[in-house]
Amino acid sequence: MIFSKLVKPRFPSAAAGIESGSATVVHLERSRRGAFTLKRAATITLPENLVRPNFDELNITDAGRLAELLSEVVLSAGLGKQQKWSVALPEAATRAAILTLESAPGSRTELEQVLNWKYERAFGAAQEELRVSRERLQPDAQGRQRYLAVGVRLSVLAEYEAVFAALGWRAGLILPRHQGEAMWISRGVAGQGDALLISSHAEGFTALMLRDRQPAVVRSVMCESEDRDDELYRLLLFYRDRLSTADGPVATRSLSSLLVVGEGFDKHHVSEIVNETLETRPRVLNSTDVGLALPSSELSFDAIAAPAGLATLAW
């Protein structure tokens, strides 16, 4: 099932990440000082069009072949006996939104009705067609209730779960890729300022802004590669113009940390866009900055950030 913070089971230290062109598995260990290291990891290239991430359509063209390749990468990492997994799904297969309630519901039933209506508007699908998890956030500046909602179509989720079942996996935690990557900037990296995650993928990118370690903005943008800069610029303008609070303008609560993961954006180019738009130069984070030691250059942080982030929930 998709993660809900209402229930906190013991999560495994092994996780998998699936993309349109690759699959990656990791097994983490944690030092006494709190730093994480890769105990085991491997990645494999997937054939073109085997996985076609999409929120509205079926994603997997050959479930048997995907199961075979996942089995191969698991064996190459020495994790063949691992049964409990967390999984990061392709970003374009999921949707995320921050939902704000205009008034306080009078009952639990009314709350569910309002949220179900908002799910349908935010995700463009009927509530009964969706699996949605939510997390209550701190109220906004006007005191209105806010929730972070993550949704996936039941038909799409069933595809992936069938592959996991064929492998004998017990996948107790299934989340969008950006949620795994966000673990790295939610562990105190942001300091006193805001933190921005840009999770780039073949179909576009997701931007997640953290303020006081909680999501302030989440946007999933589907676009062509040549439109990425313009879309990021629009997002930053929204941040600048709409997220000033009673504590002061954005200039005094500046964006201090930037984590760019995936292909499609050059990290320092993103930093330049931020500086041009917000007149601040955030610290561009790498794996060492967020507390993950990589033993070699064979696996990049971009490839493992999402599954490794989910694996940190074991502690």
Image: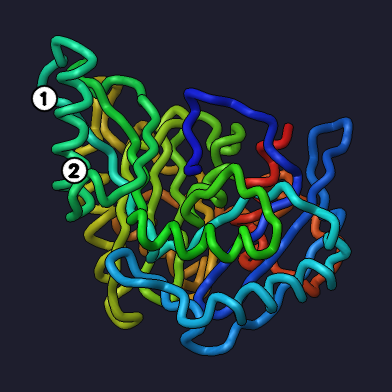
- Label 1 sits on what residue type? Glu
Q: Tell me the residue at 72%/36% (across/down).
A: 314
Circle 1/circle 2 CB separation < 8 Å: no
Q: Tell me the residue at 35%/21% (across/down).
A: 138
Image position, residue 97 (x, y; %): 29, 45
| Residue 292 placement, left or right of 29 | left
Q: Is residue 289 above or below residue 107?
A: below
Q: Quadrant of the C terminus?
A: top right
Residue pointed to by mark 1: 102
Q: Tell me the residue at 14%/10% (across/down).
A: 106
Foreground label between 1 and 2: 1
| Residue 299 placement, left or right of 248 | right
Image position, residue 227 (x, y; %): 27, 77
Displayed quadrant of residue 155: bottom left
Residue pointed to by mark 2: 241
Q: Tell me the residue at 74%/71% (across/down).
A: 71
Determine the secondary structure under disc 1: loop
Task: Please count the marks in the image.
Answer: 2
Determine the secondary structure under disc 2: helix
Residue 260 makes an appearance in the image: no
Which of 93 and 308 lies nearest the eye of the viewer? 93
Which of 218 and 311 lies nearest the eye of the viewer? 311
Mark 1 neighbour class, 10 Å CA radius: few under 14, some 14 to 19, many 20 or more: few
Displayed quadrant of residue 58: bottom left
Mark 2 neighbour class, 10 Å CA radius: few under 14, some 14 to 19, many 20 or more: few
Which of 235 and 74 lies nearest the eye of the viewer? 74
Image position, residue 275 (x, y; %): 38, 57
Which of 279 and 133 lies nearest the eye of the viewer? 133
